[in-house]
Image: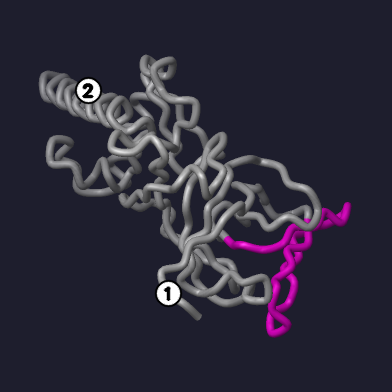
């Protein structure tokens, strides 16, 4: 009984340490850390993402955080919600009022759906007079060439507006069956969803009603560090 109480106390203490890190990070950057960033932080002293997720579940049960399945950075610290900027994924940089910091959340498939590593620790300053930064925004790096006919190439970084809906013909970031993430042109065909590539060498992806499907956002901009 005494050993069980000690384990419980250690769990509570570790959860509190992680909560403090979540709160400090959110107040500093304006958006929450990824699970990988929690594991990598030495103060948290966690060895795996699975362990981190267990502690996040404890904090969610205690009402200290809110977890959202519809966002990449899916943690929201309850007591700093009112202090967060209008865009929780974006931080206005202090050294320039004409730039906004947007996080790179991982890779996106422009080819076959990719079981993507969607958590990254990098961020980029985006010029406000070049890109329209509104609502929740994030960046994804393209893997593959299925969208090359519209100028989206392997290695490009796509700016995405986070939202759960899209109009036919828009280029979206979609998640299929809970894991596979892809960048394609969206068409709602009634009884099924068609994700159309912009490359004649690729077939359409058909999503049927028995598959889980959600829209993570709409592609609104593009960055490239080389000339084709």
* Residue 174 visible somewhere in the drawing: no
For discs 2 and 1, the disc positioned in front in the rendered view:
1
Graded by Cα atoms within 10 Å as few (under 14), some (14 to 19) or many (20 or more), the crowding at tag 2 reads some
Q: Compared with residue 77, is residue 191 higher up or lower down, i.e. above or below?
A: below
What residue is shown at x 78% (from left), y 62% (from top)? Answer: 194
Residue receiving disc 2: 16
Residue receiving disc 1: 226
Find the distance from the CA under tag 2 to the CA under tag 1: 45 Å
Give coordinates of residue 96: x percent, y percent.
34, 38
Q: Which mark is residue 205?
A: none
What residue is shown at x 35% (from left), y 43% (from top)? Answer: 34
Q: Earlier in the sequence, mark 2 or mark 1?
A: 2
Going by the image, does 171 lie left or right of 96? right
Q: Provide the secondary structure element on which disc 2 rests.
A: helix
Q: Which residues are magenta?
A: 182-208
* Residue 99 visible somewhere in the drawing: yes
The number of callouts visible is: 2
Going by the image, does 108 lie left or right of 49? right
Quadrant of the frame with the N terminus: top left
Give coordinates of residue 220: x percent, y percent.
61, 52
């Amino acid at each position: 009984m005494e050993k069980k109480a000690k384990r419980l106390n250690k769990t509570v203490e570790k959860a509190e340490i992680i909560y403090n890190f979540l709160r400090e990070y959110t107040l500093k950057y304006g958006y929450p850390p990824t699970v990988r960033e929690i594991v990598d932080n030495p103060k948290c002293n966690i060895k795996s993402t699975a362990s981190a997720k267990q502690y996040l579940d404890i904090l969610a049960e205690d009402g200290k955080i809110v977890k959202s399945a519809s966002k990449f950075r899916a943690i929201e610290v309850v007591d700093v919600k009112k202090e967060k900027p209008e865009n929780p994924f974006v931080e206005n940089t202090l050294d320039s009022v004409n730039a906004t910091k947007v996080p790179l959340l991982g890779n996106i498939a422009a080819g076959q759906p990719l079981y993507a590593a969607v958590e990254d620790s990098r961020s980029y300053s985006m010029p406000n007079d070049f890109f329209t930064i509104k609502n929740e925004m994030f960046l994804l790096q393209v893997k593959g060439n299925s969208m090359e006919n519209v100028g989206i190439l392997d290695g490009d970084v796509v700016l995405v507006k986070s939202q759960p809906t899209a109009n036919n013909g828009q280029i979206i970031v979609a998640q299929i069956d809970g894991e596979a993430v892809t960048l394609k042109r969206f068409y709602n065909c009634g009884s099924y969803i068609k994700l159309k590539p912009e490359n004649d060498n690729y077939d359409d992806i058909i999503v049927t009603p028995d598959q889980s499907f959600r829209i993570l956002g709409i592609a609104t901009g593009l960055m490239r560090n080389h000339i084709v």
